[in-house]
Amino acid sequence: MTMRLMLGSAVFEAEYVATRDQTLHGIERLSRRSGLGELAVAQRLLELMNSAAPGDALAAVPGHWLSGAGRPALLRAIGLHEPVARAWRLAAANLVLPAYLAALLLATVALLGGVLPRNGETIGWVWLAVLLVMAFPASEAVVAVINRLISESARPRQLPRLALGAGIPAEHRVLVAVPAMLADGAGIESLVHRLELHHLASREPEAQYALLTDWLDADDARRDGDEALLLLAVQGIEALNARHPATIGAGAGAGAGAAAPRFIVLHRERQFSQTEQRWIGWERKRGKLEQLVAALATGGAGPFLDCGAASRVAAGTRYVLTLDSDTQLPPGRLRELVGVAAHPQNQPRLDRSQRRVEAGYGILQPGLATPLPALREFTRFHWLFAGQCGVDPYSAASSDIYQDLFGEGSFSGKGLLNVQAVHAVLTQRLPDGLVLSHDLLEGSLARCAAVTDIGLIEEAPFHADVAASRVHRWTRGDWQLLPLLLSPRRFRLRAVNRWKMFDNLRRSLVAPMSLVLIGLALAGIGPSPGIALALVLAAFSAGP
C-alpha cells in the first residue's frame, strides 16, 4: 500500500516520515470504521487526490482529505456518513474558548471564596476592594494550574511537513536575519561570529545570512564614528564570504542579476522619531523586519544602504528566519522549519479584504530552550526563574495550549516568516511610534503556529536588573496595545487573540497587586498575612 501511495502522490513521497505515518494511520482508522480493506481506502484516497485541479496543491495532499476540508468527500467515497459527528466537532470548536474562560473564572471565584471571612464579618466596600486586589494573584495561580493540566494531558499537534532530504530547494529560499545595533567593535565581532555559527549549523545551499542593523539612537542624524562602525561590520561580512565562498541565485534591487553572497549586512539610516524626540532606526526592530519583508516581496532595495556585494539580497527569497543576537540555531533546525512552512497544508491562505491570514500559517514560532549555564555564570536568580535548562534528546513535541486548543500559537519575535503573507497583512498596517510590543499582534494577523518540536536555544537573564528591564519593556509594549484592543473594527482579530492581549495586561498587574495585598494584610486589612503570602506564593510557583 505504501508503494502505491508513493507512486500516486509526489507530495506523499516528499513528506517527512512522521507525516506519512499520520496518513497511514488515518487510512487504518477509516478501514476499521468502513469495513473496507486498507488498500481499498487508499485507492479511494488516491482517486480524490488525482482528481485535483492542476493548480490546487492542497487537494493533492493526503491530509487534506483525511483531516481537512476534503474529509466529507472522502467519507462519502468509502460509504461513511457522519453528519452528527461533524456538527458536534464544529460546535465543540466554537465552544472551546468560552469553556476555557469559564473554567478560569469559576476557579478564580472559588479560590477567592475560600479566603472570605468566616466569623460573620460583614463584607463591605473595603473587603470588595481587597477582593479586587486578590483577584490578580488568584487568577495567576488558576491560569498556571489549568494551563499546566491542559498541557500535560493534551496530545501535542504536530504540523505536517516535507522532509527536504536533498536540502532546502531554490523555490523555498530562506534568509536568516539577525536584527541588531552597531554599538562598538566587540559587539560587531560577536554578531559576525554568531552569523557564522548559524551557517555552520545549517549548511544549506539556498540559505543566506544577514545582519539587519541600525546605529544607536542619537540627537542628530549622524554622529562621529558611525561610518567606522558600519565599515567594521562590512569588513566582517566580507571576511566571512572569503572563508565560506558561495553565491546564491540572483541579486535583488541595485545590481539585480548578479549573484548574491552567502553573508550580507543590511543597514539603515536614522530617522527622527516624534514620540522619542531622537534620531532612531524607523520603528526599531519591527521597522527593520517590515522594510526587509517589503524589499523581498517587491524585489526592491528598500531603505538599506548600498554596501556593494555585501548588501545584495538573493532574489526569490520566500522565507525570513528572524533571530535575536543571543539566539542559537541548532543543527538541522533551519531545514526542519522550512519543511513545515513548505507543506501545502501549512501554506497561508489570505483574506485580502480583512488583511489577515484565514488558514495556514504566515509565521512559525519554534520552541525555545534555555542552555545549561556555565559555572562562572551561575546565579541563584537564574536557577530560580530560568526553569528547566538544557536540551532533552529524548523529548519530542510539548503541548502548547493555544496551538492544541485553538489551532494557533503566539509569536515571540523569533520565528520563520512567509514573506508574501507577512507583506500582505502587515506592511504599513500598524501606527507609527505607538506599537512597541508588536510580536503578539503580528502573530495574530499573520496567524502564527507554535512548532514546539523544533527548538531554538536562548539565554535567560542571570540577574534581576536585566530581567526587570526586559519585563518593563514588555509591559510597556503590552499596554500600548490597549487602544487597538478597544478598537475592534480597526483590527478584526479573533476572540482568542484578544484574550491573549487582555491576559498579558492582567499578568502585568499581578506583581504590583501582590505587593499591595501583602501590604494590606500586614496593616490588618483583609486576609491574614499568612493567607496573603500563601496566595502570592501560589501565583508565582503554580506553573511549571
Image (tube, grey):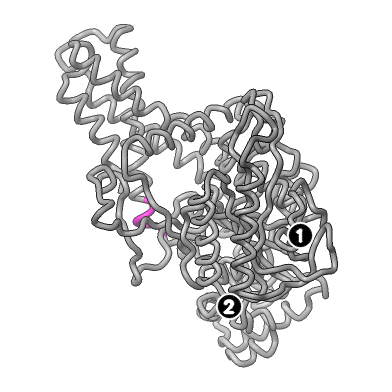
Q: Which residue is mark 2?
A: 163
Quadrant of the drawing holding the N terminus: bottom right
Q: How many marks?
A: 2
Q: Residues at badges 2 and 1 in contact (C-beta under 8 Å)?
A: no
Nearest-to-viewer mark from 2 and 1: 1
Crowding at mark 1 (Cα within 10 Å: few <14, some 14-19, many 20+): few
Query: Residue at image x 54%, y 52%?
Result: 188
**Can residue 83 be seen in the rendering of this structure?**
no
| Residue 139, numbered label | none
**Residue 90, relative to residue 440: is it above or below?**
below
User: In the image shown, does 541 or 466 lie closer to the viewer?
Assistant: 466
**Residue 313, relative to residue 180: is it above or below?**
below
Tell me where residue 354 appears, x and y as whole percent. 75, 42
Residue type at mark 1: give it: Gly
Question: Closer to the N terminus: mark 2 or mark 1?
Answer: 2
Q: Which residue is mark 1?
A: 308
User: In the image shown, does 93 or 351 lie closer to the viewer?
Assistant: 351
